[in-house]
Image: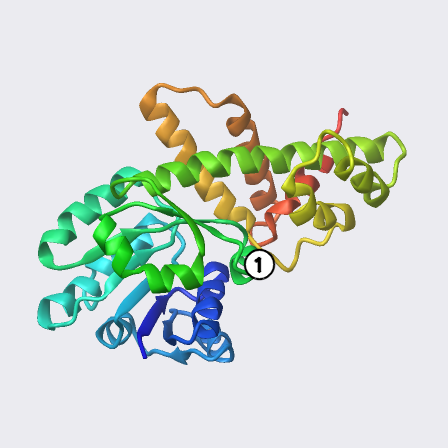
């Protein structure tokens, strides 16, 4: 049986582990949070004691940590992936599902590739619930042959995927997709709040919007949460969206591109964080919009 390590047992890591267990892989999972390790073990994964133990026992390792800093730390810090690969005959395929700074990720792959780390970038488009249901879309960057070797694991995690070229291109595509997706969420939230201000019921109006020319998949995934104001059981979090939009704005600035709508959306996400809503579902953008009224 192929053993797949999962490093990071948050929303996405747990969804990936669930898919891998269901596909018949032996899954070894690690997170710095003991409670998350215990929770993921209930899905059928084995809890690992460290990053080093996970890498040393796995044929492939899925990285599902929060940001680029954490990806670099897992790979390059003491006791990380590089240390294990450098002292062992084992060299698992490293599948990075985190949404990262594309330039830093490409530089990381260039640094560690010559030292034996087989790195594949696969950020996934979709909420953790969509990924757990097999509806996530993988955006693959890296060597084609390595992608073929990782196909059994990728088939389990994201049966639908696109190859985009070298490492970095997956994250570039993910940021562009998330820009469109985030602005769709903002438009839906603003429309629901506006309809309510006009005297309409949010839930009833959502059904009207679903049946109208304005329809988008966001209405099915996030609309009910916005209509019922249910943000406490996240599928994708506010702070994760803010991290992604900060990356978008930095990339756009480097390319000389203005992103006016993304700039406003990032400010609304910051408003959520300032109100203690950073770990809420990112449908909470509706709460930020509702707070902003003409005085």
Q: Residue at x 22, y 53 (%)?
A: 145
Measured along the vertical axis of the image, is residue 239 above or below residue 15? above
Mark 1 Cα shell of 10 Å, populated few (<14), some (14-19), many (≥20): some
Residue sitting at the far right: 199
Q: Quadrant of the C terminus?
A: top right
Relative to 39, is 118 on the left or the right? left
Residue 71: quadrant of the picture: bottom left
Instruction: Locate residue 211, reporting x and y percent.
Output: 78, 37
Give the camera-side residue of 204 and 75: 204
Comparing 6 with 278, the one in front is 6
**Residue shown at the point (31%, 38%) measured from the top left:** 169
Left or right: residue 173 compared with residue 216? left
Residue 86 image offset from top left, x and y in percent: 10, 66
**Element type at mark 1:** helix
Q: Judge from the rendering whether residue 82 lies leftward or rightward of residue 220; answer left or right.
A: left
Residue 74 visible to the viewer: no
Q: Residue 140: x percent and y percent?
A: 34, 47
Residue ID for mark 1: 129
Please identify the quadrant where the N terminus is shown. bottom left
Pick the residue in front: 18 or 245: 18
* Residue 165 appears in the rendering: yes
Locate residue 159: give its quadrant: bottom left
Q: Residue at x 53, y 54 (%)?
A: 135
Counting every numbered tag in the picture gives: 1
Q: Is residue 79 above or below residue 262?
A: below
Structure colour scheme: rainbow
**Closer to the camera, 112 or 24?**
24
What residue sits 29% from the left and 41% below the top? 168
């Amino acid at each position: 049986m192929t053993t797949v390590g999962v490093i990071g047992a948050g929303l996405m890591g747990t969804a990936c582990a669930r898919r891998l267990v269901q596909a018949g892989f032996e899954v070894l999972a690690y997170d710095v949070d003991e409670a998350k390790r215990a929770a993921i073990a209930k899905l059928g994964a084995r809890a690992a004691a460290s990053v080093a133990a996970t890498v040393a026992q796995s044929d492939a390792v899925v990285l599902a940590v929060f940001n680029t800093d954490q990806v670099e730390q897992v790979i390059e810090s003491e006791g990380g992936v590089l240390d294990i690969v450098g002292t062992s005959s084992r060299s698992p395929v490293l599948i990075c599902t985190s949404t990262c700074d594309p330039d830093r990720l490409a530089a990381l792959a260039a640094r560690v590739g010559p030292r034996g780390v087989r790195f594949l970038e696969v950020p996934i488009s979709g909420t953790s619930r969509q990924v757990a249901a097999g509806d996530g879309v993988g955006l693959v960057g890296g060597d084609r042959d390595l992608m073929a070797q990782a196909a059994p694991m990728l088939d389990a995690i994201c049966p639908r995927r696109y190859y985009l070229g070298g490492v970095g291109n997956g994250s570039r595509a993910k940021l562009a997709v998330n820009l469109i997706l985030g602005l769709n969420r903002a438009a839906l939230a603003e429309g629901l709040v506006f309809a309510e201000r006009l005297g309409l019921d949010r839930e009833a109006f959502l059904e009207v919007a679903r049946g109208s020319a304005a329809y988008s998949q966001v209405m099915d995934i996030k609309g009910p949460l916005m209509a019922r104001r249910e943000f406490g059981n996240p599928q994708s979090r506010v702070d994760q969206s803010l991290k992604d939009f900060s990356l978008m704005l930095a990339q756009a600035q480097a390319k000389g591109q203005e992103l006016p709508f993304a700039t406003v959306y990032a400010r609304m996400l910051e408003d959520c964080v300032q109100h203690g809503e950073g770990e809420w579902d990112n449908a909470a953008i509706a709460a930020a919009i509702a707070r902003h009224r003409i005085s």
